[in-house]
Image: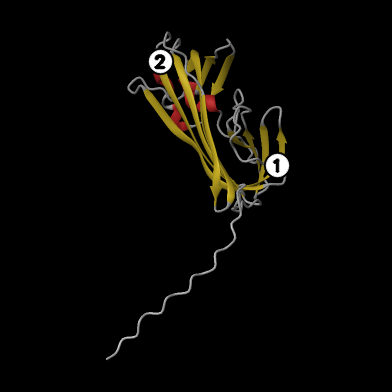
Amino acid sequence: MMAPGTTRPFLSRLSRPARLLPVAALALALPLRAHAQASIITGNQVTQATVETIDSTSGEVLLRDRDGGLITVDIPRKVHNLPHIQPGDRINIRFFQTIGADVVPADSPPPESTVTSARGVSNRHPHGMMVSFRRKRVRIAAVDPAHHVVTTVGPAGATQTITVHNKAMQALLPTLKVGDTVDVTTMDAVSFEVMNRVITSTATVQEGTGTTTAPTAPVPATPAPATGH
């Protein structure tokens, strides 16, 4: 249901003083030359929320959780097989996010993003789930491990300088070098139930045309012959 923005996490919390550590900062700190691939968990949450607004143009859904915090969810327009939601709906939502990165050959095939979604019923409530893999290729333009800073160049030539705040990630910066090609993958798994709506089972009866036959009178049973003793 959710089309990722350029730099915005698939599910990003706005209620806290600081948003989640930028996706690029987490991912670009990961590559290790001793390991072709690395990943970390950056989000794992279960909460209840109310739908505030839905932007049909951008696909952004604004939710308010039970603590009053705001959550944004980006919904790709190409995803249609999810339960319909509208402002005022109360939902239970779960999300899990990971960030991974590979140092890859510069001439390798470019990575592709994918989205898988489904809908169904959970405890008689409309249920939806989606798994999104957002993949992006960048090039390392500069790296400063002492100050925990890395500069990348994106597919369109845009340059971004990122300060890595996570200490576990800072230790990995020295493994990068200028000119490295890095494929960054963000995986988002989201599932939700619309709690203020109940789906009830219905039965459909179809009548066909035909000839009506009068009921047949029951045939009386023949009494069994009497037997003597």
Which image quarter is the C terminus in? bottom left
Q: Which residue matches tag 1? A: 86
67 left or right, relative to 23: right
**What amino acid is at disc 1?**
Gln
The amino acid type found where label 2 is placed reads: Val
Q: Are marks 1 and 2 in contact (CB under 8 Å)?
A: no
Percent position (x, y) of residue 53? 72, 38
Q: Taking 13 as reference, is 31 above or below it?
A: above
Q: CA distance from mark 1 to mark 2?
A: 43 Å
Q: Which residue in the rendered view is the most extreme toward the left? A: 229
Residue at x-position 55% and y-position 31%: 21
- How many marks do you count on the picture? 2
Nearer to the camera, 128 or 215: 215
Position of the N terminus, as image quadrant, is top right
From what the image shows, is residue 90 above or below residue 175?
A: below
User: Label for residue 104?
Assistant: 2
Picture coordinates of residue 74 (x, y %)? 62, 32
Is 225 placed left or right of 158 in the picture?
A: left
Residue 110 seen in render: yes
